[in-house]
Image (cartoon, helix red, strand yellow):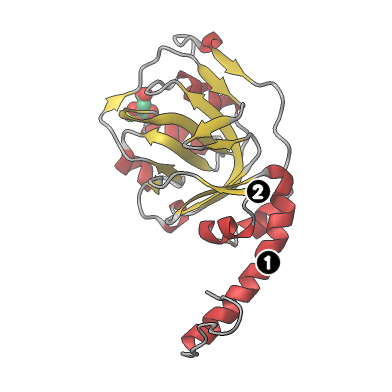
Amino acid sequence: MADFDVASVRVNPVAPPPVGADTLAALARASASLVVDQDEDDCLSLPAGLRPLGDRPGNTFLCAPAFTINARPGDNVAVRLGIERAEPGQVLVIAGKADRSRGLIGEIMARKAAARGIAGFVIEGVVRDGAAIGRLDLPVFCLGSALKRATKHGHGDVGYPVAIGNEVVYPGDVVVADLDGTAVVRSAGAAAVAARIEAALAYEADRMRSADAGTLDLGVGGPARS
Ligand SMILES: O=C([O-])CC(=O)C(=O)O
Ligand SMILES: [Mg+2]
């Protein structure tokens, strides 16, 4: 790290609010779309286009608390610092202004993160070595791949709220990402959302049994159902 101007990166010394293991386990049973159904204030949807690398089943779903990084677009000094500072089990959520010119992580950085027990990445930007990263045991949701490596000029923020598209992700918010998209649950509302998820899963299972049985119940004259 000595070669990089890490002093140019602002690091938040305050740890994010914790989210209980039971809450995380309940959210991990939901799909991203079921999560955003639950609450408009506490559950948000990140912009479309964040896709998992590779098709290993374990890499196409991610549920973990966010460790946020605001990267200077196309530069990965803040990302490198974030990989060192994040706690095992957190997902690195990187705001990169949707820059697609340079990969913010590559296979080596991804391997370092996996070795540290990082749960995965959500990158509003691109990677390099994307095919190799997709073969690791590490979910990485991003906008695609580029050939050029990131610059190492520095600047950026680690552990502060980040803006991705029109949304803001706070440290400790819970990410639920799958093939449909990336949802984020506010940490303060996560337990209540998790309780609603339990009920929603039971309701959906009932609706699916009914759908599989061919029941025609379009809700005409009754409550709207899907
Ligand atoms: O060096 C970089 O910036 C990214 C890279 O290719 C790697 O981590 O393998
Ligand atoms: Mg590389």
The residue drawn where x is 48% and y is 31% is: 95
In the image, what residue occupies the spot 41% across and 47% down?
48
Residue 29, above or below 182: below
Task: Give the farthest residue toward the left.
Answer: 147
> Where does the image place residue 26, in percent across and percent down from the top left?
66, 59
Residue under label 1, please give it. 198
Q: Which residue is drawn at the image coordinates 36% and 17% (left, top)? A: 151
Q: Secondary structure at mark 1?
A: helix
Q: Is residue 47 above or below residue 4?
A: below
Disc 1 beta carbon < 8 A from ligand 1?
Answer: no
Mark 2: amino acid: Asp
Q: Position of residue 212 (x, y in %)?
A: 47, 85
Badge nearest the viewer, 2 or 1: 2
Indicate the amino acid at tag 1.
Glu
Answer left or right for 207 relative to 108: right
Of the numbered discs 2 and 1, the one sitting upstream in the chain is: 2
Q: How many marks?
A: 2
Mark 2: few/some/many CA within 10 Å (<14, 14-19, 20+): some
Ligand 2 shows up in which quadrant of the image?
top left
Q: Which residue is mark 2?
A: 42
x, y percent for residue 130: 32, 40
Left or right of 174? Residue 17 is right
Q: Position of residue 170 (x, y in %)?
A: 62, 35
Spatial CA distance of label 2 from label 1 is 16 Å
